[in-house]
Amino acid sequence: MKKLTLLILAAAPLLLTACLKENNNCCDVYYDPYFVAERNGTNVIAAPGSAKVGTDTISIFGVSNQAGVRMRFKFNGKGIYQLSGNQSKYYQVIGSDTVSRYNLGVAAGSSVEVTAYDSTNRIIGGKFTLNMKRTFPVTSSVYPDSVKFTKGQFVIALPR
């Protein structure tokens, strides 16, 4: 009886391990999406998202109850993407009213760097820096003329 018990105890881990190794498609890939940055020196956290624009362009964005920022670029894997013009926008809201809008315009130094790309699960990660100018309202004593996002980081699932 002792020999049978020892045989079962010795064989059980082998059988359980073998079953686990065969079933490598059992689970979804886990990732923790996030979108964070410093806006003019203040830490901001936003709900991350992405959208497909046309056939080869993606939009990556972060949205909160008070504001949102979006970056749009032609994605082709890891690398640095320089942004200009309307490739990035930032807005602030109070309730459902947009109270300020910013875009890159001719401001230099704005980019997105995709540092990680999982093509199987369509997940990307990276960092960004944005230098933006206010476009609305034209003049304001409340909203700054420019907004700078530094130390931006994200992990986001791409749209299918």
Image: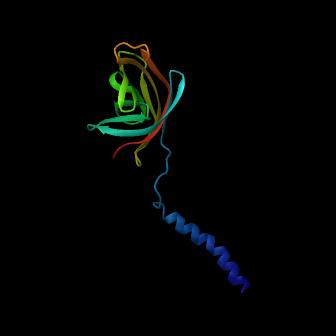
Numbered circles on residues, count: 0
Question: Residue drawn 40% across and 45% down?
Answer: 122
Picture quadrant of residue 136: top left
Which residue occupies 58% across, 67% down? 17
Q: Report which quarter residue 67 is drawn in.
A: top left
Give how far across and how far down residue 126 sits, in percent.
47, 34
Q: Nearer the viewer, residue 46 or 151?
A: 46
* Nearer-the-camera pick, 50 or 56: 50
Q: Nearer the viewer, residue 97 or 145?
A: 97
The percent position of residue 40, horizontal first and vertical second, equals: 50, 21
Judge whether 35 appears above or below 145 on screen: below
* Image quarter (top left, top right, bottom left or bottom right) of the N terminus: bottom right
Can the viewer see residue 49? yes
Residue pictured at 26% horizontal, 38% vertical: 55
Q: Give how far across and how far down residue 75 sits, in percent.
A: 35, 34
Answer left or right for 88 relative to 27. Answer: left
Q: Residue at x 35, y 29 (%)?
A: 97
Q: Residue furthest right?
A: 2
* Residue sitting farthest toward the front: 95
Compare residues 96 and 41 and report the one nearer the observer.
96
Whether residue 116 is visible, yes or no, is: no
| Above or below, 57 relative to 132 | below
158 to 39, vertically: above or below: below
Residue at the bottom extreme of this rendering: 1
Q: Quadrant of the rendered structure where residue 123 is?
A: top left
Asked which colour scheme the image uses, the reply is: rainbow
Hey, which residue is sitting farthest left in the picture?
54
Percent position of residue 5, x then y: 69, 81
